[in-house]
Image: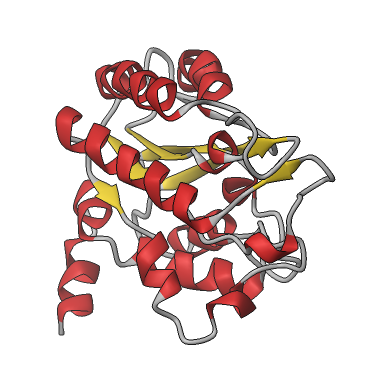
Amino acid sequence: MAMPVSPKLIVLGDSGVFGWGDTEQGGWCERLRRHWMDTPAGPVVYNLGVRGDGLERLAARLPAEVHCRGELRRQLPQGILLGIGLNDSARVGRPDGRHQLAPEGFLHGLQQLLPLARSLAPTFVLGLTPVDAEAMPFAGVLWYDLSTVRRYEGLLQEACQEADVPFLPLLEPLLAERHWLQLLCSDGLHLNEAGHALVYERIRQWPALLRWAGLEAALQLTAV
């Protein structure tokens, strides 16, 4: 009897995808990988997060990352999950310096990237996570602030609506936590274990992703 072939999800992004800051369980993506590995017919997750990545670097590596991870001959992964944008929002050198990628360029890049991703596989996009401006600058040179992060998440959502791509907001739900600063590492940028755990729970219960994964039973349980 042939074994069912589990769908493959490649997750591309920056240090948030990579799992930086979670020394206990390796980040939300690793938590999702372990959870689905223990789920009958659960998807196989490839964590392709690269620290420091922005939109342009991710777009440059997307096609090759997809085409070399089909596992079976002449097959491609069945899903793409993108977590990108926080690094693009940073200002360089000073609090009012230039962005690593200007908002107009960020939106334009998304408008090019999302149709490309969709042509390869069903695509999903995550929102951005909070930052603590009081802890800046990061690495002595990058300045992050909440108002800018909020603007860039809005651009993500706008581009996803245009491209008809499922989008999961993260910023406001995390800021709604009473002690949201305690979800961050001391650098004010990366999520810690508690932050990654909350993001994992939101993604694990995301209806659009559960439907893609064929895990409708889990979707029904979350609605109870």
Please tell me whether residue 200 is drawn above or below residue 145 in the rendered image.
below
In the depicted view, which residue is nearer to us: 58 or 104?
104
The x and y percentages for residue 144 are 62, 49
In the depicted view, which residue is nearer to us: 186 or 75?
186
Residue at (50% x, 57% y) in the render: 146
The x and y percentages for residue 53 are 62, 31
Residue at (37% x, 60% y) in the render: 203
The picture quadrant where one finds residue 170 is bottom left
Please tell me whether residue 114 is drawn above or below residue 13 in the rendered image.
above
Display coloring = secondary structure
The picture quadrant where one finds residue 187 is bottom right
In the depicted view, which residue is nearer to us: 78 or 21?
21
Q: Is residue 3 visible?
A: no
Left or right of 133: which side holds 186?
right
Residue at (65% x, 45% y) in the render: 15
Please tell me whether residue 119 is drawn above or below residue 138 in the rendered image.
above
The x and y percentages for residue 4 are 31, 43
Image quadrant where one finds the C terminus: bottom left
Image quadrant where one finds the N terminus: top left
Residue positioned most to the front: 96
User: Number of marks in the image?
Assistant: 0
Residue at (57% x, 47% y) in the render: 17
Residue positioned most to the right: 140
Q: Is residue 17 visible?
A: yes
Left or right of 170: which side holds 31?
right
The x and y percentages for residue 14 are 60, 40
